[in-house]
Image: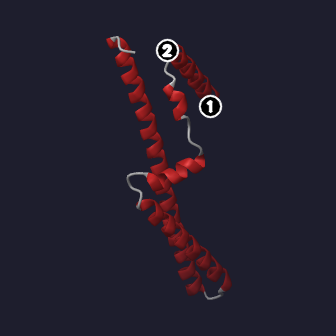
C-alpha cells in the first residue's frame, strides 16, 4: 500500500510540473460521497430499491434467528434456520451489488481522469496548451 501512495505522489508532482492544475480539483471522494453517488448514477432507482430490500431481509433474518432460538421443535428449527440462511443470503447479495456499483462508479471516475490527461497531452503535442 505504501508503494501505491508513493506512485500517486510521483504522478501528482509530474502533473504539477506540466501545469495540469485541474486534476487537483477532482480529488478523491470519501466513503459517504461514494455511497450517495449510487443514488445519483445512471441506475439511480436501483439504489433505493436494493437498500430497502437489504433492510427488509435483514429484519427478516433477525426475526428468523430469534424464532430459531426460541423454539424447541426440530422441524421448526430447520424451517427458521433455513429462513435465516436465505434472508442472510439475500442481504449479502444486495450488499455485494451495492459495493460493485460503488466500484464501477470509482472506475468510471478514474477512466475519465485518464481521458482528461490524454486530451491534455494531445493538446500539448499539437502545440495548443
Where residue 113 sits: x, y (%)?
Answer: 44, 31
Mark 2 neighbour class, 10 Å CA radius: few under 14, some 14 to 19, many 20 or more: few
Categorize mark 1 by other alpha carbons within 10 Å: few (<14), some (14-19), many (20+): few
Q: Quadrant of the C terminus?
A: top left
1 or 2: mark nearer the eye: 2
Q: Residue furthest front?
A: 128
| Residue located at (47% from left, 53% from top) | 38
Per the image, label 2 sits on a secondary structure element best described as helix
Most foreground residue, 86 or 122? 122
Q: Horizontal and vertical percent for residue 1?
A: 62, 31
Q: Do residues under tags 1 and 2 come within 8 Å of each other at their CB atoms?
A: no
Residue tagged by mark 2? 18
- Disc sitting over residue 34 in the figure: none
Q: Which residue is mark 1?
A: 1
The disc, 1 or 2, on the residue closer to the chain's N-terminal end is 1
Q: What is the x, y in percent for residue 22?
A: 49, 27
Q: Position of residue 126 (x, y in %)?
A: 32, 13
Amino acid at each position: 500500500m505504501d508503494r501505491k501512495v508513493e506512485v500517486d505522489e510521483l504522478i501528482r508532482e509530474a502533473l504539477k510540473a506540466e501545469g495540469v492544475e485541474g486534476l487537483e480539483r477532482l480529488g478523491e471522494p470519501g466513503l459517504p460521497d461514494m455511497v450517495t453517488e449510487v443514488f445519483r448514477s445512471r441506475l439511480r432507482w436501483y439504489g433505493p430499491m436494493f437498500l430497502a430490500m437489504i433492510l427488509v431481509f435483514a429484519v427478516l433474518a433477525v426475526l428468523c434467528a430469534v424464532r430459531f432460538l426460541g423454539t424447541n421443535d426440530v422441524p421448526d428449527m430447520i424451517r427458521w434456520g433455513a429462513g435465516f440462511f436465505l434472508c442472510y443470503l439475500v442481504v449479502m447479495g444486495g450488499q455485494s451489488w451495492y459495493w460493485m456499483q460503488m466500484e464501477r462508479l470509482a472506475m468510471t471516475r478514474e477512466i475519465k481522469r485518464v481521458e482528461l490527461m490524454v486530451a491534455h497531452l494531445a493538446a500539448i503535442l499539437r502545440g495548443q496548451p
